[in-house]
Image: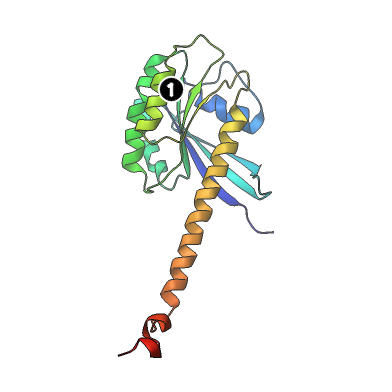
Amino acid sequence: MSELEEFKIISLGDSGVGKSSIFRRYTENKFDEDTMSTIGLAFADKELTLKNKEKVKLKLVDTGGQERYKALTKNYYKNANGVLFVFSHNDKESFDHIIEWVTLFDENCNKAEIPKFLIGNKNDLKKFDEQENFDGFIKEHNILRYISTSAKDNINIKEIFRDMAEIINQTTNKKTTQTKVEKKLKKKKPGRCQQCYGPDNMN
């Protein structure tokens, strides 16, 4: 049996916004109010069936949001297939810091086109209302989608990873097709264009 194609998805954001809770809710369908902040990095795997019935494996990388872990975690930005920028709806400062996470990711990721989602977690709590800011932010920073979630109440958690996986798959297939076409063109030997240089067109 052939190995499943792997999509690496990394989460970035301040400590305490619920990155670990989102991953745990998705992979184990569990939620713990007392989830401790990630120290450095944490990893999880989850198989997913795409719309085309193909199965893939999601490699989830949960990063610690504390300042002291940034030097360590940024090495894992390389070769990421997708990234989630997570803030908490009840913590405006965590949204204000997203620009720093976006900048840090862009400076250390080695791929030009990476699907990016903005995730507003903890929408079960009283939240600051800045929908216009969220919409403006995703347009300005080339983010594909904004999703409001609650790991506690299991709101829009599956949708994050389902939508991200479908977009990654489309992007991967497009690049693979382009590469195959380019290789075929390189193999072709240059020849005379019969339409341009046929007997009727030659001087």
Most distant residue in the front direction? 200
Front residue (pair 39, 107): 107
Q: Quadrant of the N terminus?
A: bottom right
Q: Quadrant of the C terminus?
A: bottom left
Label 1 Cα crowd, 10 Å radius (few <14 / some 14-19 / many 20+): many
Q: How is the image coloured?
A: rainbow
Q: Is residue 157 above or below residue 176?
A: above
Q: Residue at x 31, y 40 (%)?
A: 107
**Circle 1 sits in a helix, a strand or a loop, which is it?**
loop
Q: Is residue 134 left or right of residue 47?
A: left
Which three-letter amino acid code belongs to the residue tagged 1?
Ser
Quick check: can you spot residue 184? yes
Q: Residue at x 66, y 27 (%)?
A: 29
Q: Is residue 200 left or right of residue 20?
A: left
Q: Residue at x 42, y 81 (%)?
A: 195
Q: Is residue 197 above or below residue 133?
A: below
Count numbered badges in the picture: 1
Q: Position of residue 177 (x, y in %)?
A: 51, 60
Front residue (pair 84, 192): 192
Q: Is residue 117 left or right of residue 5?
A: left
Q: Residue at x 34, y 42 (%)?
A: 108
Disc 1: which residue = 15
Q: Is residue 14 left or right of residue 35?
A: left
Most distant residue in the top direction? 126
Quick check: can you spot residue 71? no
Q: Position of residue 194 (x, y in %)?
A: 42, 84
Q: Position of residue 149 (x, y in %)?
A: 55, 22
Front residue (pair 101, 32): 101
Q: Is residue 195 above or below residue 103?
A: below
